[in-house]
Image (cartoon, rainbow, N blue to C red):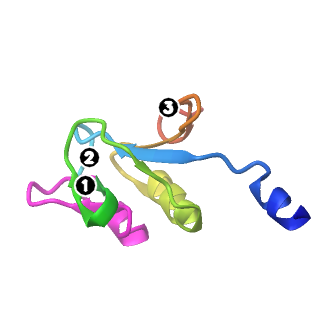
Amino acid sequence: MGVQQEAGVGVEALEVWIDQDLCTGDGICVQYAPEVFELDIDGLAYVRGAGEELLQAKGATVPVPLPLLTDVVDSVRECPGECIHVRRVSDRVEVYGPDVE
């Protein structure tokens, strides 16, 4: 029981979204985390929902899978458009992205 309890300590649910108005279509996010991001026919990046569905609604979010957190954060840091946002689900505070100082 102790191991399971410790594993959950400090791990908060995160979600990611892309501001397509700022997306430059470079595809760096897709290179880092193709399970989470995809370029559409319009040349812009979008998040991928359950069943690999591309979510094109403005501000659409998907959960950040814990095993992919590093890849998603690297996408945020390397994105030339500074358009990827990762926030806590609980209070919607951005923890990675252009709005974090």
Q: Are marks 3 and 2 in contact (CB under 8 Å)?
A: no
Could one spot residue 27 in this view of the protein?
no
Label 3: state its secondary structure: loop
Q: Are marks 1 and 3 in contact (CB under 8 Å)?
A: no
Which residue is the extreme one toward the front? 1
Residue that carries the numbered disc 1 in the rendered image = 45
For this rendering, which residue is in front, 44 or 66? 66
* Circle 1 residues within 10 Å: few <14, some 14–19, many ≥20: many
Q: Where, by quadrant of the figure, is residue 35 drawn?
A: bottom left
Which quarter of the rendered picture does the C terminus lie within?
Answer: top right
Q: Amino acid at mark 2?
A: Cys
For this rendering, which residue is in front, 21 or 33? 33
Q: Where, by quadrant of the figure, is residue 49 drawn?
A: bottom left
Could one spot residue 35 in this view of the protein?
yes
For this rendering, which residue is in front, 53 or 68? 53
Answer left or right for 77 relative to 37.
right
Which quarter of the rendered picture does the N terminus lie within?
Answer: bottom right
Measured in 3D between alpha carbons, the distance from the residue under mark 3 to the one under mark 2, in whole angstroms, is 15 Å
Q: Are marks 2 and 1 in contact (CB under 8 Å)?
A: yes
* Circle 3 residues within 10 Å: few <14, some 14–19, many ≥20: few
Residue mark closest to the camera, 2 vs 1: 1
Q: Residue at x 83, y 57 (%)?
A: 5
Could you say where residue 60 lies in the image, as x and y percent from the top left? 30, 41
Q: Which residues are magenta?
A: 25-46
Residue 99: assigned label:
3
Residue 23: assigned label:
2
